[in-house]
Amino acid sequence: MTNRLMTSRARRGFTLLEVLVVVTIMSILAVSAVPTLGVINDTQKGSARDEVIRMLEYARARAVASGRPCGVQASTLGSMMTMVQVAADGSIEPMLDPFGVDEEPISIENKFAGVSIASVDAQTDALETIWFTYNAQPHSRLADGSFGQINTANASITLSSGDQILVYPYTGFVEVAP
């Protein structure tokens, strides 16, 4: 008789109370998970902004340390950023890391989902490169790598997240637009 009682109960399904308890628990879990998705998105945006700032500050520091012009070439096409320097012969080449290996280009879109480079204003530089001199001054260069002019206005990189990273003329100070 016990087997028949268990068999008939198993075929009956869930009670209304059991279904309500499960729906309530699922609702609580869903409500607590939605804000977390927003935090993840904000973190991606902040990380992309910080990466652009890091690259600009690193190029500035390398220019001062090496005595050679260094810069960050940023492109809206594929949201690529490449660290570059002026070689001894005046040509533009990828910047070398401390181990003598070419710095790898970074795709902002691939590294930080949902964020891309919206625009680049490198002032008068046609290569969309923000350059720094040996004394940290932002300037432009011509396509052949020769010196253009010292920037007299802010250079900037704007991300799709709305963040605009400014590079101030004369000093090369890098910050997020207020």
Image (cartoon, rainbow, N blue to C red):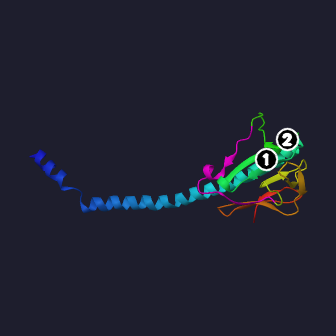
Where's residue 110, x and y in %?
A: 61, 50
Binning the other alpha carbons within 10 Å of mark 1 as few (below 14), some (14 to 19) or many (20 upward) gives some
- The residue labelled by disc 1 is 58
Where's residue 115, x and y in %?
A: 63, 57
Q: How far apart are marks 2 and 1 (CA)?
A: 17 Å
Position above or below: 101 against 149: above
Q: In which quarter of the image is residue 150?
A: bottom right
Amino acid type, label 2? Ala
- The residue labelled by disc 2 is 87
Q: In this view, does 163 lie to the left or right of 134?
A: left
Q: What stretch is highlighted in magenta?
A: 102-122
The numbered mark at residue 168 is none
Q: Nearer the viewer, residue 41 or 52?
A: 52
Return the residue found at the far top.
Answer: 99
Q: In this view, does 135 lie to the left or right of 176?
A: right
Query: Element at badge 2?
Result: loop
Binning the other alpha carbons within 10 Å of mark 2 as few (below 14), some (14 to 19) or many (20 upward) gives some
Residue 108: in magenta span: yes
Q: Is residue 151 left or right of residue 2?
A: right
Q: Which of 176 and 56 is in front in this view?
A: 56
- Disc 2 vs disc 1: Cβ atoms closer than 8 Å? no
Badge 2 or badge 1: first in the primary sequence:
1
Return the residue found at the far front.
Answer: 144
Where's residue 147, x and y in %?
A: 90, 51
Return the residue found at the far bottom.
Answer: 178
Q: Quadrant of residue 158?
A: bottom right
- Residue plotted at (80% across, 56% down): 126
